[in-house]
Image (tube, helix red, strand yellow):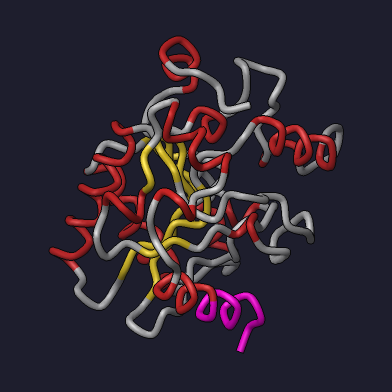
């Protein structure tokens, strides 16, 4: 079994046993709530949360989130995610949404950007020096996928955070034609996109897992960046 999937299953089990309550929230999580963000798992029953950057199993190869192992979003985004979750349950009772990332402090974004700046990978990481940061830094972006009833992610043609053409939504016709992704993987992507866009989310062309609740220009005008 893939190490990431095994770790994810363990993490989900641990989350189910995790104590709840204000006293168990970190200083960062309390700060996010003070500026108006909401805990996704507390607001949306049945949704799964596995914060990839709170583990070493990510493209940086180390834990980036300390004191943040819950997904937080602005209330408007939470409502859109709730709607997407409901739409999925109406269409596929055997599948669940899992959140890999949500609100992200800009200080973490800067660490990520430092690694990819001036490389061919920089298209996959928002520049934190523009518009105050990327959509994750305002709590209006979410990284999600679909898992089956055993907790395994269904095939999407690439792993989460795969920085290459197979992650791109805008190249899917080409990817099918060259055999880099197959029809089943395309249909799975389309299912995820269908429920998310019907719920009001915007597609990120470079990443099949990434969706925005609003345009970055709107977020930067209306919301406070998470530092």
Q: Main secondary structure of the magenta part?
A: helix
Start-end of magenta stretch: 1-10
In the image, residue 144 above or below residue 12: above
- Provide residue 107's location: percent of width, then percent of height: 71, 32
Label tally: 0
12 or 20, which lies in front?
A: 20
In the image, residue 104 above or below residue 219: below
203 or 30, which lies in front?
A: 30
In the image, residue 123 above or below residue 48: above
Q: Is residue 122 left or right of residue 28?
A: right
Residue at horizontal 58 percent and vertical 54 percent from the top: 167
- Provide residue 195's location: percent of width, then percent of height: 26, 52
188 or 30, which lies in front?
A: 30
Residue at horizontal 42 percent and vertical 35 percent from the top: 33
Q: Please say whether residue 211 is visible from this viewpoint.
A: yes
Q: Is residue 113 left or right of residue 128?
A: right
Residue 89 falls inside the magenta stretch: no
Q: Is residue 39 left or right of residue 220?
A: left
Residue at horizontal 34 percent and vertical 51 percent from the top: 193
């Amino acid at each position: 079994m893939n190490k990431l999937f095994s770790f994810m299953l363990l993490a989900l089990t641990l989350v189910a046993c995790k104590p709840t309550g204000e006293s168990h929230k970190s200083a960062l999580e309390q700060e996010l709530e003070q500026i108006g963000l909401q805990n996704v798992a507390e607001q949306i029953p049945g949704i799964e949360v596995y914060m990839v950057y709170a583990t070493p199993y990510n493209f940086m190869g180390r834990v980036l989130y300390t004191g943040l192992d819950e997904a937080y979003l602005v209330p408007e985004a939470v409502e859109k995610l709730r709607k997407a979750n409901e739409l999925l349950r109406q269409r596929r009772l055997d599948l669940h949404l899992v959140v890999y990332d949500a609100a992200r402090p800009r200080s973490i974004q800067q660490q990520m950007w430092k690694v990819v700046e001036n490389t061919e990978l920089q298209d996959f990481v928002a520049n934190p020096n523009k518009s105050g940061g990327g959509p994750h830094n305002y709590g209006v972006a979410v990284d999600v996928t679909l898992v089956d009833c055993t907790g395994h992610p269904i095939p999407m043609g690439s792993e989460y955070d795969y920085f290459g053409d197979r992650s791109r939504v805008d190249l899917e016709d080409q990817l099918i034609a060259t055999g880099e992704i197959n029809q089943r993987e395309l249909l799975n992507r389309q299912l995820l996109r269908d429920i998310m866009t019907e719920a009001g989310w915007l597609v990120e062309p470079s990443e099949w897992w990434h969706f925005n609740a609003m345009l970055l220009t709107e977020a930067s005008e209306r919301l406070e960046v998470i530092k």
